[in-house]
């Protein structure tokens, strides 16, 4: 470990702005690449039909329900290992890293099998019927195989992120995403620039995604072995239930928060789909475009977990406040830029997904949602910062409650109230999105100001 370059002193003692930017910029780039891949994937599928495109959005919350558990382990392990690194307890880090990979491997196998088996039942439970249900089932079943790789990768990601090696993560994600973008058209269509394709449609899009996730894991294993300060080895591995309990004591609240959101989004998509596939497609388009520009804010929020964790472990309590304050200032500027772009370039951005403007209703709903999204982007950024801060100090129970309250106590009830008491139609969904995010952020800041560290 001693012969590998460490970020610990820089993160715990360096200039706050430089620390935030150095760790968050690679994450911004990585997330941007992932989002571009998602948009590209959506463009490919949208070229088949709007129904195929809606099917990919429809089943995403179900997949995220499984991924959320891996993310919970990721958050817990990142926080614990970063705190140990800040306190320079390297042997404990090694133990936590090995147990993290073991846990994610076991969970990944279980999730892949379970997801594949329940796909036909869950799709119909959500209300899908006919050809839409068939396409949704195919996309869900194949992507369930990739849950194994999603979960294992979350373990390796935690190991690298806890050290502040976000640049390495960017390189890995870039290779995986580019692989997916290249494979997608060859698996989906019958002809790509004069070259023969497999013409598998939505099935091909799912297979290409699984292949790229396998590559992601293989590269991560290699990189961690060569570059990580935290050694991962199973040569003398001894299962320690105390470590597993410690990881899950933090992971379970994070899992419940994320999985609770995933279940909520599954129900939310069911509500939105009841308005028609046009509304679901408009909702998905707006979210994907907003994600494209939100990566600056999201990157800062994600970087805070390891930055706050290491400083918390090093006992730098006053520095925590400086980091959080500076992060929110940076997020405000990023959000302002995003809002301007979404409003000024609204039509060109929507034209990426909408083949022609003859689908008046789709354009109308997507266009309206873009205006709401330009305001929501501020609250999404602040929410990310609040999550990053509290996860970094190990308060995953609070982030769980915050995530669950945003969706279950605010968003879904507001949607139902507006649906049955007004004639707003899909506008009621956009209003619920805005209000739920704004109120959650207000409460998060209130708790931060009231808390003593």
Image: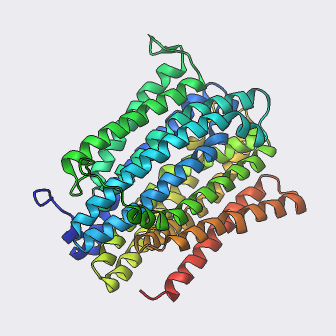
**Taking 103 as reference, is 276 above or below it?**
above
In this view, the residue in front, 111 or 200, is: 111
In this view, the residue in front, 443 or 287, is: 443
**Taking 436 as reference, is 36 above or below it?**
above
From where the camera sits, is residue 337 visible?
yes
In this view, the residue in front, 415 or 293, is: 415
Residue 89: quadrant of the picture: bottom left
Residue occupying the point 22% across, 65% down: 90
How far from the left and from the top, in percent, is residue 167?
28, 52
Residue occupying the point 38% across, 48% down: 30
How far from the left and from the top, in percent, is residue 423?
88, 57
Indicate left or right for 229 with 99 as reference. left
How far from the left and from the top, in percent, is residue 105?
42, 45
Indicate left or right for 359 with 253 as reference. right
Indicate left or right for 16 with 1 as reference. right
How far from the left and from the top, in percent, is residue 374?
58, 59
Q: Which quadrant: the N terminus?
A: bottom left
Residue 18: quadrant of the picture: bottom left
Indicate left or right for 278 with 442 as reference. right
Residue 414: quadrant of the picture: bottom right
């Amino acid at each position: 470990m001693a012969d590998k370059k460490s970020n610990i002193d820089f993160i715990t003692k360096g200039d706050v702005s430089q620390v935030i930017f150095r760790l968050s910029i690679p994450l911004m780039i990585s997330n941007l690449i992932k989002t571009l891949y998602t948009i590209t994937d959506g463009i490919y599928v949208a070229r088949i039909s709007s129904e195929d495109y809606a099917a990919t959005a429809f089943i995403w919350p179900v997949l995220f329900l499984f991924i959320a558990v891996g993310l919970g382990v990721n958050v817990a392990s990142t926080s614990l290992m970063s705190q140990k690194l800040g306190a320079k307890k390297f042997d404990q880090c090694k133990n936590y890293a090995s147990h993290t990979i073991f846990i994610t491997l076991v969970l990944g196998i279980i999730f892949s099998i379970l997801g594949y088996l329940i796909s036909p039942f869950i799709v119909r439970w959500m209300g899908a019927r006919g050809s839409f249900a068939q396409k949704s089932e195919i996309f869900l079943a194949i992507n369930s195989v990739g849950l194994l790789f999603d979960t294992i990768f979350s373990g390796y990601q935690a190991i690298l992120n806890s050290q502040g090696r976000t640049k390495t993560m960017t390189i890995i994600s870039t290779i995986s995403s580019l692989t997916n973008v290249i494979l997608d058209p060859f698996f989906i269509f019958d002809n790509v620039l004069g070259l023969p394709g497999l013409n598998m449609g939505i099935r091909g899009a799912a297979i290409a995604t699984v292949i790229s996730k396998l590559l992601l894991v293989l590269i991560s294993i290699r990189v961690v072995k060569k570059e990580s300060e935290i050694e991962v080895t199973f040569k003398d591995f001894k299962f320690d239930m105390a470590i597993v309990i410690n990881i899950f004591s933090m992971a379970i609240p994070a899992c419940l928060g994320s999985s609770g959101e995933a279940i909520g989004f599954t129900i939310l998509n069911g509500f939105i789909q009841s308005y028609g596939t046009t509304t679901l497609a408009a909702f998905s388009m707006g979210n994907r475009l907003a994600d494209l520009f939100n990566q600056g804010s999201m990157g800062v929020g994600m970087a805070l977990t390891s930055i706050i964790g290491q400083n918390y472990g090093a006992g730098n309590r006053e520095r925590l406040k400086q980091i959080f304050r500076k992060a929110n200032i940076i997020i405000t500027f990023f959000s302002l830029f995003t809002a301007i772009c979404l409003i000024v370039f609204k039509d060109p951005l929507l034209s990426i997904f909408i083949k022609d403007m003859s689908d008046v209703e789709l354009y109308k709903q997507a266009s309206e949602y873009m205006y709401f999204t330009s305001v929501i982007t501020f609250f999404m950024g602040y929410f990310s910062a609040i999550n990053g801060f509290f996860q970094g100090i190990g308060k995953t129970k609070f982030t769980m409650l915050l995530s669950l309250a945003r969706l279950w106590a605010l968003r879904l009830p507001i949607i139902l109230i507006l649906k049955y008491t007004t004639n707003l139609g899909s506008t009621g969904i956009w209003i619920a999105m805005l209000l739920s995010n704004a109120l959650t952020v207000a409460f998060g800041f209130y708790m931060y100001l009231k808390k003593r560290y």
